[in-house]
Amino acid sequence: MASSTMDSATIWLLIWTVNNIGITILNKMAFQQVNFKYPFFLSAVHMFCNYLGSLYIFRSLARSTSASSTSSAYSASAGISALLGTINRKQINAPGRKMIIAFSVIFSLNIAIGNLSLRYVSVNFNQVMRSLVPAITIAFGLALKKDISQRRQLAVIPVVIGVAMACFGDMSYTAVGFFVTVFCVILAALKVVASGEMLTGDLKLHPVDLLGHMAPLAMGQCLVLALFTGELGGIWGRREELNPFANFYPFFIVSLSGVFSFSLNICSLMANKLTSPLTLCIAANVKQVLIIAISTILFGTEISLLNGLGIIVVLVGSGRYSYVSLMEKTTAKASLRPVSALKDDADEEEGVALIAKV
């Protein structure tokens, strides 16, 4: 039994890693190889796929509870429950709806600006800059008068130094790309704080429930941005070129990117359930190395010696910060909660990160 669980955990970790790498590479391919340079519309596609996925999950659960449900419906429901745990669709009151609307704005902007960043900068630069998210999160925490240990503050210093080394010189980015990516990093940190409030605050929504409430709002917002930035007009002007019946490849890349964005959520949930937070921290750093290595080969990104050393410092520093953060959380919980509760809490916190990675 233990061997079977370990094998399942390994398989889901591999799928989770492939999803993480896949969505980053697919987005870059959409912009660079397919010339689908419409980041806001691409983000709307992601939200549409996430909404359809969450809708399918809730309808499958609803069918299993109806009087006329079949054995296959019960099997589907049992599989979803085993995979994602108990999911209850909560009724949201007026203050809760306002919170979800506000979060959807942060969420859609983060995804849209993140995709926009990939249009202007290399995948390597994007990944290195995203390593600053813990430092920005700490800055937000200090501004909000939160208690953040000196050990954790010191742990982000190598990351900041490594980012400076990695960005110096000839790594592929433009001035516009730099500022867009910095804005993306700030939004990512803000989203971590906001998603934690949605999942563990007063609402305590299940990640799939939050996705179901938030995804259609974020999709609408991304479509509005696509309209006002001229993306919809650009797509309409290229309707013959982008027609999937005439050229299936662009449609395939964009659609697959959307599917990966939802499957990443499911894989993250399953990986959370079967592994420890420390394992996920290590896997996240391995994933970052693989993304940089693969994107360097695929897109021919030039890396100087200083850039390469900076990337190594960032990766090691990120791993160190993850370890320090995890140890502090585990120590704090051990002093307040029974040992049996630690795994559930760790899973809940990793669920926050899950939503942040769509």
Image: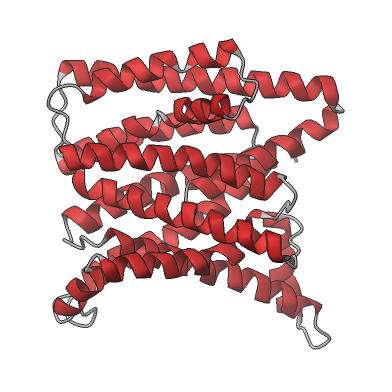
In this orientation, which residue lies closer to the viewer: 256 or 110? Answer: 110
Q: Looking at the picture, how far across and down is residue 94, in whole percent?
A: 70, 65
The outermost residue toward the right is 338
Q: Is residue 3 visible?
A: no
Query: Residue at horizontal 48%, vertical 37%?
Result: 189
Q: Nearer the viewer, residue 348 or 79?
A: 348
**Residue at 48%, 21% in the rendered image:** 319
Q: Is residue 174 left or right of residue 190?
A: left
In the image, 148 versus 66, the foreground residue is 148
The quarter of the displayed image where residue 281 is located? top right
Instruction: Tell me what residue is drawn at x 42 percent, y 45 percent.
Output: 20
| Position in image of residue 111 (x %, y %) | 40, 52
Position of residue 104 relative to residue 151, above or below, is below
Residue at 23 percent of width and 68 percent of height: 231
Left or right: 358 as drawn, with respect to 306: right
Relative depth, front residue between 230 and 275: 230
Q: How is the image coloured?
A: secondary structure
Instruction: Name the outermost residue toward the bottom.
Output: 68
- Measured from the top left, where is residue 202 in percent x and y? 75, 49
* Quarter of the figure that contains the N terminus: top right
All told, the count of numbered labels is 0
In this rendering, position of residue 243 left or right of residue 262: left
Left or right position of 17 against 330: left
Residue 225 in sight from this viewpoint = yes
The part of the image, by quadrant, that contains residue 163 is top left
* Location of residue 275 in the rendering, given as x and y in whole percent from the top left corner: 64, 36
